[in-house]
Image (spheres, helix red, strand yellow):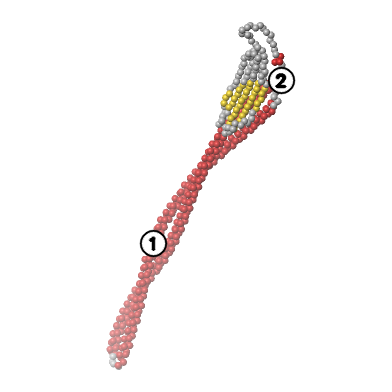
Amino acid sequence: MSVRAVKTTTLSSVSTSRGPSQGFSSRSFSGYGGYGVGGGRQSFAIHSSYGGLGNSGAAVGTGGFKVVSGYAAGGSGNRVGGVEYGYIGFGGGMAGGIANDVVAPITAVTVNRSLLAPLNVEIDPTIHSIRTQEKEQIKTLNNRFASFIDKVRFLEQQNKMLETKWKLLQEQTTSRSNIDMMFEAYIANLRKHLDNLGHEKLKLESDLHHMTGLVEDYKIKYEDEINKRSECENNFVLIKKEIQEMQGQIKDISVVVEMDNSRDLDMDAIVAEVRAQYEDVANRSRAEAETWYQTKYAEMQQSAGRYGHDLKLSKAEISDMNRRIVRLQSEIDMVKSQKNHLEAQIAEAEERGELAVTDAKHRIRELEEALQRAKQDMAMQVRQYQELMNVKLALDIEIATYRKLLEGEEDRYNADA
């Protein structure tokens, strides 16, 4: 955006004389002054001429006042408005001289009566409309200046709002970093808990293997005891059969003795002796058999009681082992489920962490882009603010110039009136 302001003021008075004359001329300064990219120029010029002495004569000239104001925006060079007006001026001169070569006699002074006639000085009828137009232009410039001030205030508010947003974005970035640290600590805690569960799982698996070996040993012992009991029962059955066979043999011997006594021999003494012998043998055999049987039976009962007690203990231990196996299996299943759940949580936490990191990076990138845009907007607004301040200063100078010119013209008009 460029602002160029040009002011030119010209006051001139021209006088002519029919004789040699001396003149006086003055001009004001012309300088450059302006603000903005394009800069501006202000020029003030006053031209005045006064007639000198001559033989005789008078001159009438016109004096003019010209005001040209221009405003160009963006380097386009378009003229916004201009005002030109002037007044008729007067000029007169008198001249007289003495010849250098010949001494002339005193001559009569003649005066041109037409020069003494009053001039028809009329006021420009458009002066009122021109002044009205100038006032309207001043009002327009004041309105534009007020709008520029409003825009400057709006830009200041936008600047404060952008600074507030920037502070909030910086605070959000700090909170994002704290969230990343919290996620990392939570993931580290979960991994530590997973390692502890893995060690506990290995310990439980070793206990399960040991208990399985003990159960197998107790099963083997139980089978051995069952085999021994079966063997004892078989021996008991065999002993009973032997006893029954021996009792049968004793009965057969008694029958044979009775059959041999059919010859009516006096075998009473022999029979009694033999019977006594056999009864003695049978009694000894019976006693030995009963003793052996009782001994074996007592041993078998003792063994059966011992084996039964051991069997009960084995069954109780087996039941306890089975319960422990079931409990360990349930604990292993629970640990496995916890492990799977923790692995799922870790995977989910890692996924959430990655998503959070990605989202945080995306948000940081967006915030950086927003910050860059905010900086660009702020720089542009600062440039616009500076340009507006330059325009404001130029307008202040222009208004002051207009005010001085109008006050001077009003004073002159009042003096003429």
Q: Quadrant of residue 398?
A: top right
- The residue pinned by badge 1 equals 209
Q: Quadrant of the C terminus?
A: top right
Task: Give the class, few, some or many, for how many residues have Cα within 10 Å of label 1's Cα (few <14, many ≥20).
Answer: few
Q: The disc labelled 1 sits on which kind of residue?
A: His
Front disc: 2 or 1 = 2
Residue 314 image position (x, y, % from top left): 39, 67
Task: Choose top left, top right, bottom left or bottom right for residue 210.
Answer: bottom left
How packed is label 2: few (under 14 Cα within 10 Å), some, or many (20 or more)?
few
Instruction: Name the spot of residue 83 as percent of width and height, x first.
Output: 65, 27
Look at the image and tell me whether residue 16 can be seen.
Answer: yes
Left or right of 107: which side holds 214? Answer: left
Quadrant in which the N terminus is drawn: top right
Q: Residue furthest bottom?
A: 264
Asked whether 158 or 292 is in front, the reply is 158
Q: Is residue 354 left or right of residue 221?
A: right
Query: 31 or 84: which is nearer to us?
Result: 84
Q: Which mark is residue 345?
A: none
Q: Which residue is mark 2?
A: 120
Could you tell me the amino acid type at mark 2? Asn
Q: Which residue occupies 33% across, 75% down? A: 295
Taking depth in this image into account, of 384 and 229 the one nearest to the observer is: 384
Does residue 389 appear left or right of residue 257 in this picture?
A: right
Identify the element where label 1 is drawn. helix
Separation of disc 2 and disc 1 at Cα? 137 Å
Q: Nearer the viewer, residue 355 or 240?
A: 355
Q: Earlier in the sequence, mark 2 or mark 1?
A: 2
User: In what element is the residue under mark 2?
Assistant: loop
Residue 13's spot in the image, x, y percent?
64, 20
Left or right, 152 with reference to 216: right
- Choose top left, top right, bottom left or bottom right for residue 91: top right
